[in-house]
Amino acid sequence: MDHRDYFSDLARQPGNTALAELFKLTERPDIISFAGGFPGPDMFLPEEAAEVTRQLLVEEPYTVLGYSPTPGFSALREFLAERQSRLGMPAAAGEILVTSGSLQGLDILGRVFLNRGDRIIVEAPTYLGALSTFASYDVRIDSVPVDTEGLDTARLAALLEQLRRQDALPKLLYTVPTFQNPSGQTMSHRRRQKLLDLAGRYGFLIIEDNAYGELRFAGEEVPTLKALDTDERVIYLGTFSKILSPGIRIGWIHTAGEIIERAVLVRQAMDQCSNSLGQLLALEFGRRGLIEKQISKTVHLLGERARLTLDLLAREFPTGTTWTEPEGGFYTWVSLPPAVDTGRLLSHCIEKARVAYVAGAAFYAGKGGNNQMRLCYSQPSLDDIARGIPRLARALTTLF
């Protein structure tokens, strides 16, 4: 039988398979992958994780093996509230919802706020997982470019004024303001203040996705939007995926208590709760200072890998190519000459050069990015970077 006859309208949509495809590449040992946005294997603390896990299973076996409350274990929520406060974002436990990764947090917020036909604004380019999530709500998506100072707030202001005249202002704006995925750029302090001013003037909420914000290896710290917010317009998404472990699937939402209450009701109809072992592992890592230890280790490794990647791009890539120079996070964003189609060239680079990247078009809500690519330097070793960037450069040079 043809099961497609039973599919919903959502399931019939073609969708973007880029996220699933890049995860497949992690299972191919013959490929040097600059595609997946994953921590390198040497960034983890496996011995400490094994010790903590053994202790939890011995001392709290029924808690580890059972369900947690839908909002998350109270002790973890209290820890996260204290940690957020320490990072300049005052929080109480009732303002924290533990999620199965920050992407689930984004999905929950979509269900809390978005109706069919609502309008949202994203960056161009932006995180492809967010684009896939928003697409499932049948909403109108407008994009604003990112440059060396992050989201272009002048372009945003012009768009908002146009939408105001059309009585079509957005309900939400989604941003990754610090070490953005995919560009690696960071929104300047000046633009952060301007964005908050625009949110107040035009009446929209901001979702701040801060997956990479603690992974700075150069430059000066910039306050989060949540830290600068005085009007409760910023909804903060955090995750342990980049600073502890993506495998534990633990993130969190930090926002006003009345939003958390609605989000908990939505969460009950999804997966009910996050996994107990992951929550307790994160909590114990935090109590022992191991999260900060891993962040320090990760930042050092990222700095080494980013510097080598950028040096090799300058040495090996063809004339007419440009790239971003991030001060933290996992990514650099490469722009090739306009005639180059990185999507068309990807399969050749994988099969012939044994090197992978993510083609730029996947990161745009509309058209754009055909000549661009995201390179992730966090996962490959220094040796793999030293071999992979020249191989990629040679493969590209022979094709255009």
Image: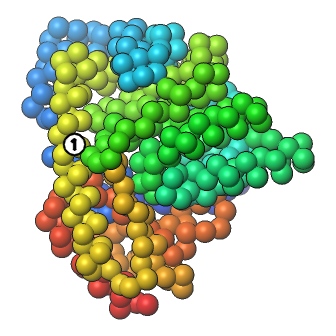
Across the whole image, how many numbered discs are drawn on residues?
1
Image height check: is 6 above or below 347?
Answer: above
Most extreme residue toward the right, as rendered?
Answer: 166
Amino acid at circle 1: Thr
Identity of the residue furthest to the front in this view: 190
Locate residue 177, reporting x and y percent.
50, 43
Label 1 residue SS: helix
> Residue drawn 47% across and 33% down?
224
Q: Quadrant of residue 194?
A: top right
Q: Is residue 192 left or right of residue 202?
A: left
**Depth check, front residue: 3 or 209:** 209
Percent position of residue 183, x then y: 46, 57
The image position of residue 333, as x and y in percent, is 42, 63
- Residue at label 1? 298
In the foreground, 267 or 305:
305
Asked if one can make out residue 180 in the rendered structure from this viewpoint, the answer is yes
> Is residue 68 among the parts visible in the rendering?
no
Where's the N terminus, which quadrant? bottom right
User: Mark 1 packing: few (<14 Cα in 10 Å), some, or many (20+)?
Assistant: many
Q: Position of residue 261 (x, y in %)?
A: 61, 13
Quadrant the C terminus occupies: bottom left
Residue 43 in the image: above or below residue 292: below
Figure quadrant of residue 193? top right
Residue at 64% from the left image edge and 27% from the top image edge: 233
- At 41% from the left edge and 17% from the top edge, which residue is drawn? 85
Residue 133 located left or right of residue 188: right
Question: Which scheme is used to colour this image of the protein?
Answer: rainbow
User: At 49% across and 26% down in the image, what residue appears?
Assistant: 227
